[in-house]
Image (cartoon, helix red, strand yellow):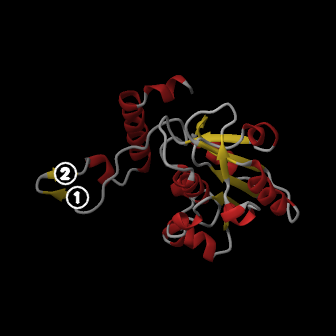
């Protein structure tokens, strides 16, 4: 899988992709992540990529030309399944969406800045708009990194135990059950007996029940949407 990320400040993202699971995915040749500096595609003086709003108002707007030039250059070499704009007013990111995107081959992520991008890009170029929450950040780099991490861990071969991702929270519209590790008794705080029983059937029943109770308590909306 290949993910191209268009950003005004791509250096912000270098470290995030250079460690842990995402680095392992790149090392194994399972995931390519390419960062592109939008400033490099600007023909304006000082490589400017923003301009004043038509109609007035506070804040600058990211210009069409450098963004579209970058996208069109990438499209010369391959077909992209999605061109995604990370924006607070996009569709809220959920696990089902991540599952679907993990099956794609080539994706472009556009990180917004300032007051956003020229609306004509959203109308004619962008294929999907995604938000990671109902709040505003300084730019789309953190949301893009979140999306790449969520996608990357689902690619077969990335995780050492591929069943791990299948039991994460939200995969079945349920939150994950409680988990424990050694020691079984720490300062009198004990692991539930069922987890020490060795009875796989009882353990799975316990985990399902715990998932249901935790979801009802913390995220009842997940059950309503099931």
- Label 2, secondary structure: give it: strand
Q: Which residue occupies 73% across, 60% down?
A: 44
Asked whether 49 or 163 is in front, the reply is 49
Q: Position of 209 compared to 5: left or right?
A: left
Asked whether 189 or 36 is in front, the reply is 36
Q: Residues within 10 Å of mark 1 (few under 14, many from 20)?
A: some
Q: Is residue 141 above or below residue 128?
A: below
Q: Which mark is residue 190?
A: 2
| Picture coordinates of residue 108, whole percent (x, y) | 72, 55
Q: Which residue is mark 1?
A: 184
Q: Which residue occupies 73% across, 55% down?
A: 107
Q: Residues within 10 Å of mark 2 (few under 14, many from 20)?
A: few
Q: Are marks 2 and 1 in contact (CB under 8 Å)?
A: yes
Q: Outermost residue, left direction? A: 187
User: Which quarter of the figure is the N terminus placed in?
Assistant: bottom right
Q: Is residue 45 above or below residue 209?
A: below
Q: Which residue occupies 70% across, 35% down?
A: 54
Spatial CA span between label 2 and label 1 = 6 Å
- Label 1, secondary structure: give it: loop
Q: Which residue occupies 35% across, 29% down?
A: 217
| Picture coordinates of residue 215, whole percent (x, y) | 41, 32
Q: Is residue 14 visible?
A: yes
């Amino acid at each position: 899988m290949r993910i191209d990320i268009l950003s005004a400040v791509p250096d912000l993202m270098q470290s995030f992709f250079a460690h842990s699971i995402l680095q392992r995915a790149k090392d194994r040749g399972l995931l390519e992540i390419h960062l592109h500096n939008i400033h490099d595609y600007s023909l304006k003086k000082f490589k400017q990529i923003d301009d004043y709003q038509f109609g007035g108002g506070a804040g600058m707007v990211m210009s069409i030309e450098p963004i579209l030039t970058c996208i069109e250059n990438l499209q010369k070499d391959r077909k992209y399944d999605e061109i995604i704009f990370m924006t607070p007013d996009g569709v809220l990111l959920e696990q089902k969406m991540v599952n679907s995107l993990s099956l794609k081959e080539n994706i472009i992520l556009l990180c917004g800045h300032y007051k956003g991008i020229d609306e004509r890009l959203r109308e004619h170029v962008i294929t999907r708009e995604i938000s990671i929450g109902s709040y505003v950040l300084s730019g789309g780099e953190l949301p893009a990194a979140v999306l790449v991490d969520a996608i990357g861990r689902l690619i077969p071969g990335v995780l050492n135990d591929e069943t791990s991702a299948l039991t994460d929270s939200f995969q079945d519209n349920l939150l994950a059950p409680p988990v424990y590790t050694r020691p079984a008794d720490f300062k009198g705080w004990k692991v539930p007996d069922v987890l020490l029983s060795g009875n796989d059937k009882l353990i799975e029943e316990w985990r399902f029940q715990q998932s249901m109770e935790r979801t009802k308590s913390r995220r009842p909306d997940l059950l309503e949407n099931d």
